[in-house]
Image: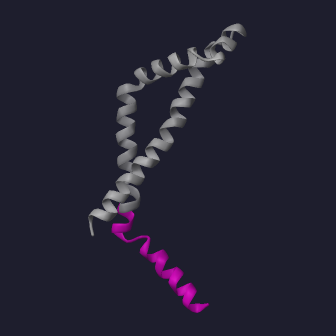
Amino acid sequence: MENVLKALGNALLSLFHPKILGLTLLPVLLAFFLWGGLTWWFWQDWVTGVNQLLAQTPVDEYLLRHEIHWLAASVTTVLLILLLFPVILVTALLVTSVLATGNG
């Protein structure tokens, strides 16, 4: 049991090594700023595209019928933000894998 605790303690200490911190934090920050910039640049185009897709579904007809069409803008914003989270995480994982395997 002592060996297991010692191994866990060594693993915890190695988490704060600069190379490990760089491999965990740098790709996430890079992906966040990359997609944040793309979001800033293309937000209106993405909103227009999602609104056009939403207009082709029964949801838009329902919102118009019940006079809550203002909700469509909120749904569009929430949907785009929810779609961005997995894209940012996948990008961060790809950057991490390239950095981790490229340094041999």
Indicate whether residue 61 is drawn in magenta.
Answer: no
Where is residue 57? Give x, y as percent: 61, 18
User: Image quadrant for the C terminus?
Assistant: bottom left
Identity of the residue drawn at 37% across and 71% down: 17
Left or right relative to 104: residue 53: right
Say above or below: 2 vs 55.
below
User: Image quadrant for the N terminus?
Assistant: bottom right
Instruction: Compare residues 34 and 57 and report the one nearer the observer.
Output: 57
Where is residue 2? Give x, y as percent: 58, 91
Which residues fall within the magenta stretch?
1-22
Identity of the residue drawn at 50% across and 22% down: 50
Where is residue 63? Give x, y as percent: 67, 13
Where is residue 45? Give x, y as percent: 40, 21
> Which residue lies most toward the left here?
103
Identity of the residue drawn at 48% across and 77% down: 11
Say above or below: 55 vs 16.
above
